[in-house]
Amino acid sequence: MSPTPTRVSASAPAKTNLVLHVGSPTPDGYHPLETLFVAVDLRETVTASVNPAIARRGVGIRITVEAERGSEYARMVSEGTARLSDVPLDGTNLAVKAALAVCEALDVPVPGLELHVRKAVPVAGGMGGGSADAAAALVAVNDLVARHAGVAPMDTDELLRLGAGLGADVPFMLLGGAAIGRGTGTEVESVAAEEQLHFVFVPQDQGLSTPAVYRQWDANHTVTNASTRSAPRTGIAPDPVPTAVLTALADADPDALAARIRNDLQGPAIQLLPELEGLLNHGVELGALAGWVSGSGPTVCFLVRSRDAARRLVLDFVREHRHALAVAGPVPGARVESRE
């Protein structure tokens, strides 16, 4: 029998949304979505370790974070255009919430956990870095704590249920590949995408708050009532993901896909950060097939025809003193990387 590990590392991917359709907010304040996720090969890694000394001090979980060595995010941190201090190191961190949710679901006490996050995804960039941390933590802590407690670990369906309670993108980060997201994005359905597509991410020096982008969407969809007060329109249902988009994705046809990419949050993001529009146009001028704001932004994503085209576009942006990175997808979702 192999020894019980004291440390488990898991990783989860970043994402972009090839389609993101938004509906008017429901009474609970959430906007229904119809979105098409693609997971890309930029991954966050969370290492969970059992440390009884933490428990003896009355601390359930301690979290630390570092930039992934050699990553574009690490270069941004070293240049001062990104700050690790933007990552919370308390109970508001999604990885901490995920670890606590696993212990509760397994019905075991928190054994004194250390979580160490290696970040490669820029913070508040619309690529789902925080959700990837949560997904990786769910997988790592589920594996580690279940083995220590001598109980059966949760299966994928149970982890997906926990993930849905943590954030809109977390279930997809667990699933990976390509999938349609519905509701708040937590209802995921895998779709065919056998061949890889190639993208270039261009992160920005400042983040955009997702709630702020949705508030701007609301402001763009208001009605004035009899008392001349403006209020968000109700009853707007998100458009479904078009069949033509799914066909282009299944066929790995970047030209057909480029013509059908749509993000309803792009307009609000540009209103809050107008320079994004010029960058989108510039990337297409440099040879990209299409450019769009990733999620709620402000990271801009470009679709290109090949890996070589992605490298060329990255070099063009680097010559202009911009941060840029080539990625490909779809890739697998959250997974255990090692046990020690």
Image (cartoon, rainbow, N blue to C red):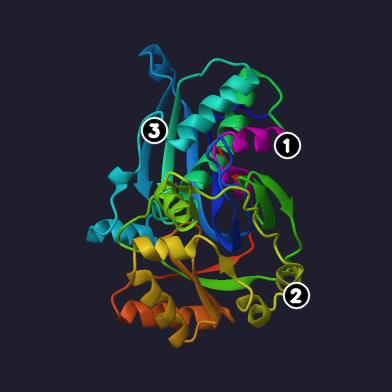
Looking at the rendering, the stretch of residues picked out in magenta corresponds to: 157-173
Q: Is residue 324 a member of the stretch shown in magenta?
A: no
CA separation, marks 2 and 3?
42 Å
Q: Residue at x 50, y 70 (%)?
A: 292
According to the picture, the residue beneath numbered tag 3 turns out to be 63
CA separation, marks 2 and 1?
29 Å
Vertical comparison of 173 with 198: above or below: above
According to the picture, the residue beneath numbered tag 1 turns out to be 157
Q: Which mark is residue 309?
A: none
Viewer-proximal residue among 232 and 285: 232
- Quadrant containing the N terminus is top right
Which residue reaches farthest front?
226
Viewer-proximal residue among 212 and 294: 212
From the image, give the main secondary structure of the stretch colored magenta. Answer: helix
**Quarter of the view holding residue 251:** bottom right
Give coordinates of residue 242: x percent, y percent: 72, 66
CA separation, marks 3 and 1?
26 Å
Q: Label 1: state its secondary structure.
A: helix
Tag 3: amino acid? Ile
Viewer-proximal residue among 8 and 305: 305
- Quadrant containing the C terminus is top right
Vertical comparison of 55 with 202: above or below: above
Of mark 3 and mark 1, the one earlier in the sequence is 3
According to the picture, the residue beneath numbered tag 2 turns out to be 251
| Residue depth check, mark 3 versus mark 1: number of the one nearer the observer | 1
Residue 334 seen: no
Tag 1: amino acid? Asp
Q: Is residue 162 a member of the stretch shown in magenta?
A: yes
Q: Label 3: state its secondary structure.
A: strand
Tag 2: amino acid? Asp
Q: Mark 2: few, some, or many residues within 10 Å (few <14, many ≥20)?
A: some
